[in-house]
Image (cartoon, rainbow, N blue to C red):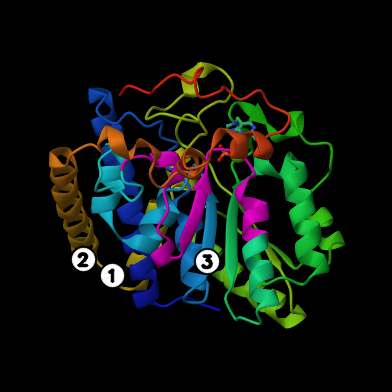
Amino acid sequence: MGIDLPLLLSLFEDLVLVRECEERIRREYASDEMKTPVHLGIGGEALAVGVKHALPQGASYFATYRNHAIYLTLSQDTDTFFAEMYGKVTGCGKGKAGSMHLSCPDKGLIATSAVVGTTIPVAVGAAFASRYQDSSKYTCVFFGDGATEEGAFWESVNFASLHRLPILFVCEDNELAIHTFRHERQGYQSLSSIVETFDIPFQAAEGWNVEEVYKGATKVLAEGKEKGGPAFLHLPYHRFLEHVGPAEDYNAGYRPRPDRMETLFDPILKAKEKLISLGANEAQLEAIRNRILTKIEASIQKAKAAPFPQAEELYTDVFAESLQTLSHEEKAALFPMSHLATPSEEKPYHA
Ligand SMILES: Cc1ncc(C[n+]2csc(CCOP(=O)(O)OP(=O)(O)O)c2C)c(N)n1
Ligand SMILES: [Mg+2]
């Protein structure tokens, strides 16, 4: 099963969009105007890009704090992306979400979270709703290899398997949970043997090769569909930068810089080589990159000029808003185990 030039060009365009947005964050970050922590996915762009292009239109997505690639691939919206990085009202979370909680429900990205593993059961709930409502809506959830050590992961896989839910589990495997390698964290032999025990089709693909990711996702989706249940995609990749922040960290002492790192693990270089072999030329690829750089520059300028949210908006669009509307007695009934401040003890918030 090959992949043709027009499809690979559109995959390449998304890879470059994600890479250049993150490279721009790296350059801007030192000015300390972006107050949000950033978990950059350089080296892992092909995961979201390849999977998104393989999934049916209209699918719902859930992901982690390392979510820039899926947000940008789905929304194509650099204005709302950079505005959120700068904490501005024009951001996708009105300046209150930050990098770790990007979403664009209208384009399919329902939720992302800083708390490891949390979106997995929520995604399974969305897939259960599809099954329950006889809808054809498909769900996809991205999570790191570290999340597979959590109970929520096992319960989710079990429930999805038992109820034959229409969901694709995608493990973004950089072998690391912050600085700790898999062999120091996991007692089981392999993810594939475990997932297959649940009778879920399993496919691994090289995460640095967008073509392989696309083909792996397409294949395992078809197998899941044939079985009438979930599917699982395992995507190893190399994280080029530190866990959080804009820099490389090969001098930190916990991992060496791989020899020929870019040649082996850079998804953009790989896609470029393949495109040239299919007949694309350098100038054409450079024109794609230049178009994206122009779009990013305009978004950065707009984001910097936009206002911050007002202090009065602190409790709007957040869970705390609904609590605000409750009386003290209603709150106490909701949280019977906690000591809640009485109104006279409550301290007003001053921005
Ligand atoms: C429930 C929970 N436990 C611990 C943390 C602290 N923490 C933040 S990132 C991280 C590592 C997660 O690794 P992985 O799931 O592989 O994702 P990666 O950062 O490699 O993409 C941990 C333990 C957290 N955010 N949430
Ligand atoms: Mg990891």
Q: Which mark is residue 87?
A: none
Q: Which mark is residue 280?
A: 1
In this orientation, does residue 333 appear?
yes
Q: Nearer the viewer, mark 1 or mark 3?
A: 3
Residue 276 inside the magenta-drawn segment: no
Could you tell me residue 208's position as x and y percent?
50, 52
Given the image, on which type of amino acid does mark 3 rest? Ser
Residue 104 inside the magenta-drawn segment: yes
Local crowd size for mark 2, using a 10 Å CA cut-off: few (<14), some (14–19), many (≥20): few
Could you tell me residue 129's position as x and y percent?
65, 70
Question: How far is disc 2 from disc 3 in space, using C-alphas?
Answer: 33 Å
Earlier in the chain: of badge 2 and badge 3, it is 3
Earlier in the chain: of badge 1 and badge 3, it is 3
- Residue pointed to by mark 3: 60
Given the image, on which type of amino acid does mark 1 rest? Ala
Question: How far is disc 2 from disc 1 in space, using C-alphas?
Answer: 7 Å
> Residue at horizontal 38%, vertical 23%?
349
Up-down relation of residue 350 to residue 263 (above or below): above
Could you tell me residue 311's position as x and y percent?
28, 32
> Residue at horizontal 34%, vertical 69%?
10
Local crowd size for mark 3, using a 10 Å CA cut-off: few (<14), some (14–19), many (≥20): many
> Residue at horizontal 46%, vertical 48%?
67
Q: Which residues are magenta?
A: 95-124
Work out whether residue 187 or residue 271 is closer to the camera in this orientation and state it: 187
- Residue pointed to by mark 2: 284
